[in-house]
Amino acid sequence: MIDFGKEAEVDERSLLNELLDFVSTEIKELGSEREMAHIERIIREGTGADRQLAAWERTQDTKAVVDHIVVETYEGLSLP
């Protein structure tokens, strides 16, 4: 990504973290910290697609990728 303030190419995670810092006051005022935590997690850990590709690269097995998706899906569910 291009940081137009620096007039240089920078790592997208650095630029996104800078943006989150820039809006941090507004995030607190709006009570949106929980929602922003999801964005911060994606910046840190990557997207679901990143994790699926990593599972594929580790195993070269489509079933293992599907199993990975199922596990992540269940982790995200609130079951009684």
Image (cartoon, rainbow, N blue to C red):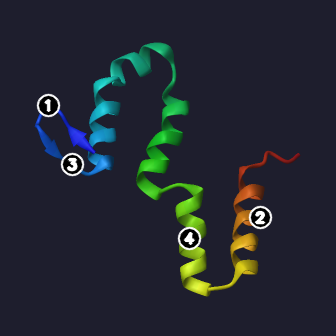
> In the image, residue 52 lies at what x, y percent?
60, 67
> In the image, residue 2 lies at what x, y percent?
23, 41
34 w.r.t. 45: above or below: above
Among the two numbered marks 3 and 4 on one chain, the one whose residue lies closer to the N terminus: 3
For the residues labelled 2 and 1, the Cα–Cα distance comes to 42 Å
Among the two numbered marks 1 and 3 on one chain, the one whose residue lies closer to the N terminus: 1
Q: Given the image, on which type of amino acid does mark 3 rest?
A: Val
> In the image, residue 37 lies at what x, y percent?
50, 38
| Residue hosting label 1 | 5
Q: Given the image, on which type of amino acid does mark 1 rest?
A: Gly
Query: Residue 27's quadrant in the figure?
Result: top left
Secondary structure beneath dot 4 equals helix
| Residue hosting label 2 | 70
Q: On residue 10, which mark appears? A: 3
In the image, is 37 to the left or to the right of 1? right
Is there CB contact under 8 Å for labels 4 and 2? no
